[in-house]
Amino acid sequence: MNLPKKILTWYDNNKRTLPWRIRENSKKKLYYRILSEFMLQQTQVKTVIPYFNNFVKKIPNLKALSKSSEKQILKLWEGLGYYTRAKNLHKTSKILIKKYNGQIPESFVKLKDLPGIGDYTANVLLALIYNQPRIALDGNVKRVLSRLFNINTEDVLNLFKTRRNGDLAEALMEFGALICKPKDPRCHECKIKKMCAYYASESKVRLKRKIKIQLKSYDIFCYLKKNKKQIALTKNNDLGFLKKFNLPKIQETSKKNKNWKFLCNYKNSISNKKLNINLYYKFSTKIPSEYNWYSLNKNNEFIPSFTKKIFRQISHLY
Ligand code: SF4
């Protein structure tokens, strides 16, 4: 049995039941796959499942998504993080409905032109929806291929010829997630260990480590209303993350914080950054024109968890 056949047989017998795995080609399958691929960028399967189920309950198809408000989408995305994904998904749904009649383009280049779709997502969608012979190289698949051939290379795609391209793209990811795991590959139960160079080799090639987490220090300055439990927020921060979200003033740590009272220091992770936060405050009724007052308790608006954490710290003052 050749390699793709072995992996597909393993996949057929062992794949997980996931809510976005729909067999028949349909509009539902297209929508579920696009939505899940956006959610799965940077987030683990088990975290995505409840968000996905809730999302499709409220917004059941691509057309409904294109007509939803960004506010509604962000509310459903709340807690999943990396909110640019939600915004890009919304923009992409509008383009797909308007320009492509609710389908995805069959061209890799055109697909990659859509907001939030990079090489990986374009490859995986073309394989899953159009059965194109593409292998989507996420971390799992790169690891499987590197171990199998005991080399750090991506030039192995022509070894995977099959008619079930969509399934194979997914089978490789699934195999990497369940068997050829990052730390402890389950080689003893692996159906392709006889073909695996890593298994046979004494000098195993180490995979490149993941991107290093950056640690950065930021000062956050909160204007507060003394008797009303309110905080002033602005969309005017440009940090490269949480752009255009309501936040207090944030800047990289400096020593010129004389007019502010220090509240606390804590750590927060966001995207691939680890942030060291110094939180400052002052009670004031006057705020700069680009700020608006927000309640620390009740908000109908979407608030990123980064901001909620600030709210929690500030609440100790009242
Ligand atoms: S034998 Fe081990 S390292 Fe090789 S593919 Fe199987 S699980 Fe991965």
Image: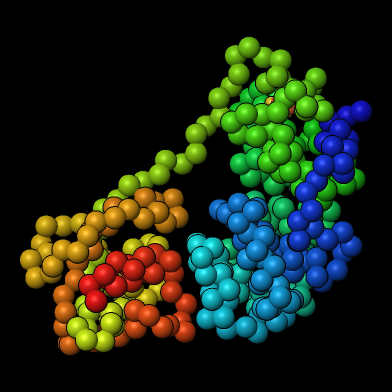
Residue at image position (64%, 53%) is 46
Q: In this view, does 131 lie above or below 56?
A: above
Residue 126 x %, y %: 76, 56
Specify the color scheme.
rainbow
Residue located farthest toward the top when viewing the structure as drawn? 202
Residue nearest the observer in this picture, 305 or 130: 305
Confirm whether residue 77 shows in the render: yes
Residue nearest the observer in this picture, 236 or 18: 18
Q: In which quarter of the image is ligand 1?
A: top right
Residue located farthest toward the left when viewing the structure as drawn? 258
Q: Is residue 174 left or right of residue 254?
A: right
Q: In this view, does 108 lie to the left or right of 239?
A: right
Residue at image position (84%, 31%) is 3
Residue 56 x %, y %: 71, 72
Residue 191 x %, y %: 82, 28
Residue 49 sits in quarter? bottom right
Q: Is residue 27 left or right of residue 278?
A: right
Q: How many labels does the image show?
A: 0
Q: In this view, does 248 lie above or below 279?
A: below
Residue 222 sits in quarter? bottom left
Q: In this view, does 193 lie to the left or right of 75?
A: right
Residue 254 sits in quarter? bottom left
Confirm whether residue 146 shows in the render: no
Question: Where, quadrant-wise, is the N terminus in this rendering?
Answer: top right
Residue at image position (88%, 29%) is 2
Residue 38 x %, y %: 62, 61
Question: Where, quadrant-wise, is the C terminus in this rendering?
Answer: bottom left
